[in-house]
Image (cartoon, rainbow, N blue to C red):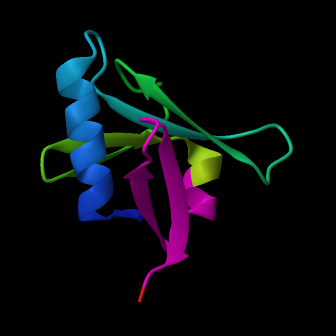
Amino acid sequence: MLALTENVTDIVKKLAEEVPGISGLRIAAEADGQSLSVSPVDQAEPDDQKIEQDGATVYVDGPASELLADKILDGVVNEEGNIQFALGQQA
């Protein structure tokens, strides 16, 4: 299962607190099967896996959950306020 770093949980919690109607992030596989999209959402899609960690919620669709099963998601907010995500291998 995808793991989340403390940075990501902080980003997701702050996003959910500051933006009305947002409960978490959703990670979905694109049609090419290799790319992923990340978007703020108010709820999961019917077949999404729900990951709750330290008060943050991330939803992952079925195809993406297979790609991310052994990964860890990290993130930072840059000086312009943009969120950047990175994937790493779980130890």
Q: Which span is picked out in magenta?
A: 65-90
Picture quadrant of residue 18? top left
Q: Is residue 77 magenta?
A: yes
Estimate the x, y position of residue 11 in percent, counting from the top left: 29, 43
Query: Is residue 84 one of those drawn in magenta?
Result: yes
Indicate the position of residue 26 as horizontal and vertical percent values. Answer: 47, 35
Q: Quadrant of residue 43?
A: top left
- State the image coordinates of residue 61 (x, y, percent, origin top left): 54, 41
User: Is residue 78 or residue 68 the one in the foreground?
Assistant: 78
**41 to 48, vertically: above or below:** above
Residue 28 falls in which quadrant of the image? top right
Q: In this view of the protein, which residue sits in the foreground, 19 or 3?
A: 19
Q: Residue at x 21, y 34 (%)?
A: 14
- At 79% from the left and 54% from the top, the residue drawn is 34
- Check the image and name the residue furthest to the left: 55
Q: Is residue 41 above or below residue 80?
A: above
> What residue is drawn where x is 29% and y is 10%?
21
Residue at image position (34%, 17%) is: 42
Q: Does residue 9 appear left or right of residue 29 in this picture?
A: left
| Quadrant location of the N terminus in the rendered image | bottom left
76, 39: nearer the viewer: 76
Rendered location of residue 83, percent (x, y): 46, 42
